[in-house]
Image (cartoon, rainbow, N blue to C red):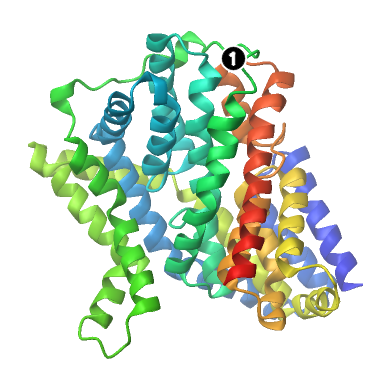
């Protein structure tokens, strides 16, 4: 019976979001109430469970996502994102244009939310395609594959960060493992796949072609742009490597771990960006803080959706459903990593949102972390891979791609959907290979 209640709850979530277009946060809270009441929780305990789930999920995450949004906005508003794109394209040349865009998407995608990175970088892709006379999809897909992978796999992006916190996974290890898996996923879904769609013609709509284009003197240097954008990754990565190879009695051990704490690393990166991308370029503090302030509005709903998913997770735990599901799945001969990936995939197909699919799947498979002894970092990446699978007409990213590239629904399915599915399949294969090695 508990499993049936959860399945009905997920169905309600799907209907509310996909059919009635209800806000995802509201839908999550409604499903929390349904599951809790159906499981026999007292009303006061149910409300407390929802509050605890929201608080525990957002407590650490607010700082990471907040600072991440600020860094992404400063990178965009300063022209650093454009500098990275144009700089890499000129270095690599037309022959290797795809690899330049792969690297661009990866570097810019790490500090920037997917939709923001998409809107900022796609017009530059249009410009590059027009200048080189190369097919638009041949130029655009490698960049979008990179953006999608960073969104689904890598902290400090919302879903992988939130799921890491839920699972008690080490964010530094999740980042390192994620980068290892990201490389083949991007290569297969980007440069390799894009060579198979040359017969599909994409022409950007005119209203999407002319955003603000910075003049050369308005942009920071290439080195400053890249170092500022990747600073949190350097700090988190150094801390993760130090944990693997240094002992706690090393005199700088605690300092390195402190600086590599994701929240501290993001704070340091924002402070550095305020100077390197703002004050150091003769901008006034008021102007820089305006960019910082406006960045927060873009993540408000993301935070609420994550909070709603956290609430559902806590209701599943407090009502005993998680333990029940865990006992059912515990006897399965299927790997917990594959189970997590399959559940995330099904939810992605039903709900559309990768973030919602990933966080909901995390709440369902949470008991497997302790009972199976599987690596929580690899579980994060398995769910991240599944959450990107089979994007179709109920996913906002599907329509964003379709409209910007001026494609039919059929051609969008042939390109965008296949690209996302390739990322998801290569991702779970990479997770399974790492699991056999580690």
Q: Residue 391 vs residue 154: left or right?
A: right
Judge whether 148 appears above or below 217 on screen: below
Residue 234 appears in the figure: yes
Q: Residue 246 vs residue 255: left or right?
A: right
Residue 45's quadrant in the figure? bottom right
Going 74% across and 65% down the picture, which residue do you hit?
Answer: 33
Residue 308's quadrant in the figure? bottom right
Q: Nearer the viewer, residue 44 or 77?
A: 77
Q: Residue 71 location, x and y as percent?
A: 30, 48
Q: Nearer the viewer, residue 83 or 207?
A: 83
Q: Nearer the viewer, residue 211 or 292?
A: 211
Quadrant (top left/top right/bottom left/bottom right) for the C terminus = bottom right
Going 83% across and 75% down the picture, which residue do you hit?
Answer: 39
Going 54% across and 75% down the picture, which residue do you hit?
Answer: 168
Judge whether 125 appears above or below 28 on screen: above
Q: Nearer the viewer, residue 195 or 332?
A: 195
Q: Residue 318 location, x and y as percent?
A: 70, 80
Of helix, strand and loop, which one carries label 1? Answer: loop
Name the residue carrying label 1: 406
Crowdedness near tag 1: few (<14), some (14–19) or many (≥20) residues, C-alpha within 10 Å: some
């Amino acid at each position: 019976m508990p499993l049936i209640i959860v399945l009905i709850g997920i169905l309600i979530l799907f209907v509310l979001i996909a059919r009635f277009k209800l806000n995802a946060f509201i839908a999550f809270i409604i499903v929390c109430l349904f599951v809790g009441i159906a499981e026999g929780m007292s009303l006061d305990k149910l409300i407390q469970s929802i509050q605890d789930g929201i608080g525990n999920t957002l407590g650490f995450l607010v700082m990471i996502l907040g600072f991440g949004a600020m860094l992404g906005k400063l990178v965009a508003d300063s022209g650093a994102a454009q500098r990275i794109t144009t700089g890499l394209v000129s270095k690599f040349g037309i022959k290797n244009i795809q690899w330049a865009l792969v690297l661009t998407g990866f570097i810019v995608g790490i500090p920037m939310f997917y939709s923001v990175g998409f809107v900022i970088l796609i017009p530059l892709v249009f410009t590059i395609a027009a200048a080189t006379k190369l097919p638009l999809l041949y130029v655009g897909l490698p960049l979008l594959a990179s953006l999608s992978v960073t969104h689904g796999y890598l902290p400090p992006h919302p879903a992988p960060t939130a799921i890491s916190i839920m699972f008690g996974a080490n964010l530094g290890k999740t980042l390192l493992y994620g980068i290892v898996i990201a490389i083949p996923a991007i290569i297969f879904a980007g440069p390799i796949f894009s060579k198979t769609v040359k017969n599909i013609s994409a022409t950007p709509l005119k209203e999407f072609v002319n955003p603000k284009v910075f003049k050369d003197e308005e942009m920071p240097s290439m080195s400053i742009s890249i170092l500022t954008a990747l600073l949190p990754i350097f700090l988190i990565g150094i801390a993760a490597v130090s944990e693997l190879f240094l002992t706690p009695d090393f005199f700088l051990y605690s300092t390195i771990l402190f600086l590599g704490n994701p929240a501290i690393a993001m704070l340091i990166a924002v402070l550095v960006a305020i100077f390197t991308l703002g004050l150091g370029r003769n901008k006034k503090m008021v102007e820089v803080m305006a960019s910082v302030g406006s960045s927060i509005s873009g993540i408000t709903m993301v935070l609420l959706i994550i909070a709603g998913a956290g609430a559902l997770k806590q209701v599943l735990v407090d009502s005993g459903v998680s333990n029940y599901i865990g006992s059912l799945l515990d006897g399965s001969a299927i790997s917990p990593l594959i189970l997590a990936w399959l559940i995330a995939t099904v939810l992605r197909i039903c709900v559309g949102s990768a973030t919602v699919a990933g966080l909901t799947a995390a709440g369902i498979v949470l008991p497997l972390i302790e009972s199976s002894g599987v690596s929580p970092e690899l579980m994060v990446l398995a769910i991240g891979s599944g959450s990107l699978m089979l994007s179709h007409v109920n996913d906002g990213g599907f329509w964003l791609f379709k409209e910007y590239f001026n494609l039919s629904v059929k051609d969008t399915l042939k390109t965008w959907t296949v690209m996302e599915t390739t990322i998801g399949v290569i991702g779970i294969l990479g997770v399974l290979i790492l699991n056999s090695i580690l």
